Image (tube, rainbow, N blue to C red):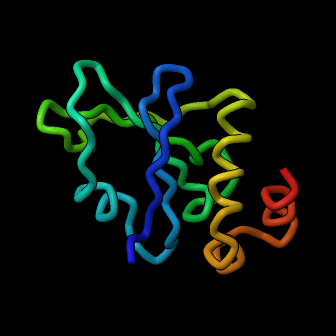
């Protein structure tokens, strides 16, 4: 079983959104094994809500290297628009077991579950 989900995003210049599910696994350890289609200038958005919470560190922008790996040496924490937040929350809602066993508070879990 994987500890992440990959979904198409195609919003704000991001090819995909990677949702990390398991707060027990280091972010870098999870991301280093993920391969994407190599696209010049391609980037993905990583949602760490279940790992780090609903804060300014929730979303990470990561560039895709020429071999399709994620360049973990070049990343940035980013603020995203409401459309992306809604999409990210809907993805998390497909995995209620991971949501319920995450580091989020009960009120944060309800916020995601009702969005």
Residue at the image position 51 percent from the left and 54 percent from the top: 19
Most foreground residue, 68 or 111 = 68
Residue at the image position 47 percent from the left and 58 percent from the top: 5
Most foreground residue, 48 or 85 = 85
Answer with the quarter of the image where residue 100 lies.
bottom right
Q: Is residue 53 above or below residue 75?
A: below
Residue at the image position 58 percent from the left and 60 percent from the top: 52
Q: Position of residue 54 (x, y in %)?
A: 69, 53
Q: Is residue 78 above or below residue 88?
A: above
Q: Position of residue 114 (x, y in %)?
A: 87, 56
Looking at the figure, which quarter contains the N terminus?
bottom left
Most foreground residue, 79 or 65 = 65
Q: Position of residue 26 (x, y in %)?
A: 38, 67
In the rendered structure, the answer to whether residue 29 lies left or right of residue 67 reads right
In the rendered structure, the answer to whether residue 3 lies left or right of residue 86 reads left
In the rendered structure, the answer to whether residue 1 lies left or right of residue 32 reads right
Q: Position of residue 99 (x, y in %)?
A: 68, 71
Residue at the image position 52 percent from the left and 34 percent from the top: 9
Numbered circles on residues, count: 0
């Amino acid at each position: 079983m994987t500890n992440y989900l990959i979904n198409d995003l195609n919003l704000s210049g991001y090819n995909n959104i990677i949702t990390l599910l398991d707060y027990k696994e280091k972010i870098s350890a999870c991301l280093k094994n993920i391969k994407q289609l190599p696209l010049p200038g391609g980037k993905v958005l990583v949602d760490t809500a279940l790992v780090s919470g609903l804060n300014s560190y929730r979303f990470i922008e990561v560039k895709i290297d020429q071999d399709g790996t994620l360049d973990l040496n070049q990343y940035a924490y980013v603020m995203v628009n409401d459309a992306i937040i809604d999409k990210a929350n809907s993805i998390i809602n497909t995995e209620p077991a991971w949501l319920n066993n995450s580091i989020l508070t009960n009120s944060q879990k309800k916020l995601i579950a009702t969005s």
